[in-house]
Amino acid sequence: MEWWRDGCFDAIICDGAVRSGKTFALGVSFFLWAMACFQRQRFGLCAASINGVRRNLLAQAKPVIQRLGFRWEEKVSRNEVVVRGGGRENVFYLYGGRDEGSFASIQGVTLAGVLLDEAAIMPRSFVEQACARCSVRGGRIWFSCNPAGPEHWFYKEWIRKAAEKNALYLRFAMGDNPALSEEVRQRYERTFQGTFYRRYVLGEWVAAEGLVYDFFDAEAMAEVPEGEFARWRISCDYGTRNPASFGLWGELDGIWYRVKEFYYDARAEGRQKTDGEYVRDLENLAGERCIETIIADPSAASFIEALRREGWTVRKADNQVLEGIRRTAEALKSGRIVICKECTAAAREFGLYCWENGGVQDRVRKEFDHAMDDIRYFVMALDSDEERAARFVERPAF
């Protein structure tokens, strides 16, 4: 928390396990450093998205900073926070580094310091532009991230060269978070497997290899449970020459079951289907059930339009592949989603869906991935809904 006091290092890098407290420690100490050392300066707070900055950094740091006597003013429309206290005032700008074009948002500004949360998932162009903005005397760069593959540019350029760059490197474990109970820690250890376990629990920079969902046991798939399902959804991965995969999901007692599916391989069948035919196939899958929403492949513009013309409620899926795989693995391991025995196409793909061997970035092979994609779309939409509900604060009636 006070690494910056002796002035020995120009940067700090904190990596390691999830839920290890690194974002909280880094966020609070960043504000304390800025307010202790600077007056009327500008700072950058960066994550993959601006909402991520607010959720992961501001939400944790704000209560602590206010308890220490500082005044906190957030200007939401301008994506900035003004902190005042001890006769000092500084401005903190919020930036999202989602894609290669994001570097333009931070270009040209002069900063006294920048904090990059989850630096390993941001584009290199954005991270390097943010670092280049820190030109005020005494400025420092702050990084946090979870490990990725050993060929990742951030690992090679910053972690392996920490001494050369005069950066303090700290590796966090789950045991470093005093707020994490033993029960919760063990739950996280059970949730992850394979590559994700080594990265997010052990904090290792290791390559992804083998089956993506190497824990999935097709022999142990569940029967469709008895009882009345509360809600229904359908997830779709669309294909013309490639296979199309639709999954029917029902919620019972807080668990989502993939109870049925539709899978059509145009190459194997020797005939491509039209959008209209796929709409009829989806209607047959839905039957008489009340489908609250369809989560569709975001690239399937014509199919989405055909569904909407028929009166279906459609939302475009979040197509973040690696994040979606991680969240799907968590949902399967925790039992939040269950694949039922009737879903034979999904079962087959679980046994074939593999990581690409080698390479700088984590990639999955683009084969046997159509049911895998529609399942991933479903989980990402489910998480998005739950995150939105968690952020909602009901206002009292007057």
Image (cartoon, rainbow, N blue to C red):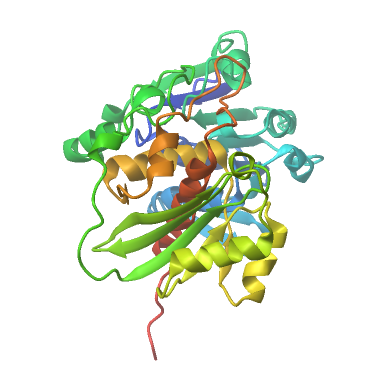
Q: For the C terminus, which image quadrant? A: bottom left
Where is 197 relative to 377, above or below?
A: above
Left or right: 311 as drawn, with respect to 130: left
Left or right: 388 as drawn, with respect to 237: left
Left or right: 301 as drawn, with respect to 81: right
Left or right: 13 as drawn, with respect to 275: left
Residue furthest to the top in view is 164
Residue furthest to the bottom in view is 398
Q: Is residue 84 visible?
A: no
Where is 139 relative to 10, above or below?
A: below
Q: For the N terminus, which image quadrant? A: top left
Rendered location of residue 190, percent (x, y): 25, 33
For the point 64% across and 46% down, the residue is: 96
Where is 89 relative to 172, above or below?
A: below
Rendered location of residue 189, percent (x, y): 27, 31
Where is 105 relative to 74, above or below?
A: above
Q: Is residue 287 visible?
A: yes
For the point 25% across and 39% down, the residue is: 180
- Is 76 in front, or is 218? 218
> Would you identify the image quadrant in which residue 218 lies?
top left
- Is 334 in front, or is 365? 365
> Would you identify the image quadrant in which residue 123 lies?
top right
Residue furthest to the left in view is 183
